[in-house]
Amino acid sequence: MQIGLSLPTSGKFASKQAVEFIASEAERIGCASLWVLERLLRPTAPVDMDGRTGPMSESYACVFEPLETLSYVAARTENIKLGTSVIDAPFHNPVVLARRFATLDQLSCGRVIAGLGQGWLREEFVTTGIPMDTRGDRLEEFVASLRAVWGPDPVSYAGSFYSIPPSEINPKPVQSKGPPIIIAATKPRAIKRAARIGDGLNPLATSLRELEDELRLFRGSVREANRNPNNLQVILRANNTLTEDPLPAPRQLLSGSKDQIIEDLVAVRQLGVDHVFFSFGHSGVPLDKQIHLMESIVNNF
């Protein structure tokens, strides 16, 4: 199982210098991947967050653009994978985003992982003028459009939301089938969609029981779609809290002390998770401490 780390592109540590530090140190200590997120805005009014209403985290007041950041990092690293978790597909044009991913794949010599989501923040849908109730269907067409653009010329696609007239569209990615497309999903309908159209699933680490249920649904849905679960990745995002002393139960999966986190990594590996990456953006863990923890995990796991 591979271990990755999010870049400090939001919150109080977000800066050019911080991105450079984490990127170089993560590659030095043997991390497999670096990750960025997308956020268009932070509403000043309370927002609906999966049934809870409240203020959005202040860490979203400033968020670096994901692909620009990864292009910068690609020039300063050699081998580490570069992933998005996630870019919300409905807010973009698929041809434009496909070309941006392909360009990054060229510049990084084939290191890109394209993590996509369908979006959840109503205010972002208002801002982009996209009806929120079309987001799932749009995501299906968006993925099909990306794969068309990354395929041989002439490219063409005709759908309800996106159309591409027969055209030459370049550059093509270095990766022969294009960057793997992993789909962020936690709800059953979204997980089933990821099983049909994605190259993998990008769930969120909440509890071991929830993760086990999500993976059972995902793999069953993959088989129902006449696909092989062994060909698809599970890349787990851990928005975790790091503590000096062990956290009491119940605690969020992959949160707590170093020993608790390593114990959880063993458990998620047994569930067949291929890749875990840690995001410390909300917890305020100093950058040097992040690297110290990650080095210890990489060396001892």
Image (spheres, rainbow, N blue to C red):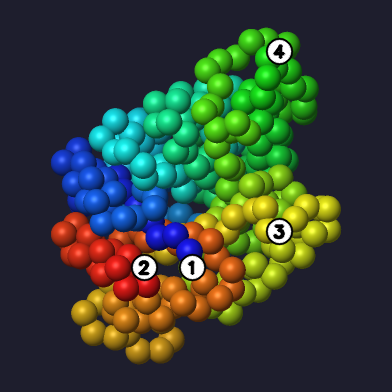
| Real-space Cα separation, disc 1 to disc 4, in angstroms | 41 Å
Q: Are marks 3 and 2 in contact (CB under 8 Å)?
A: no
Task: Identify the residue at the far bottom of this view.
Answer: 248
Residue type beneath disc 3: Pro
Name the residue: 64% across, 61% down. Answer: 187
Q: Secondary structure at mark 1?
A: loop
Q: Which residue in the protein does label 4 denote?
A: 154
Residue type beneath disc 4: Pro
Name the residue: 77% across, 27% down. Answer: 159
Q: Are marks 1 and 2 in contact (CB under 8 Å)?
A: yes
Q: Secondary structure at mark 3?
A: helix
Point out residue 147 in the picture as x, y percentages from the top left corner.
66, 31
Name the residue: 16% across, 41% down. Answer: 17
Label placed on residue 229? 3
Residue type beneath disc 2: Asn
Rendered position, 106 above or below 37: above
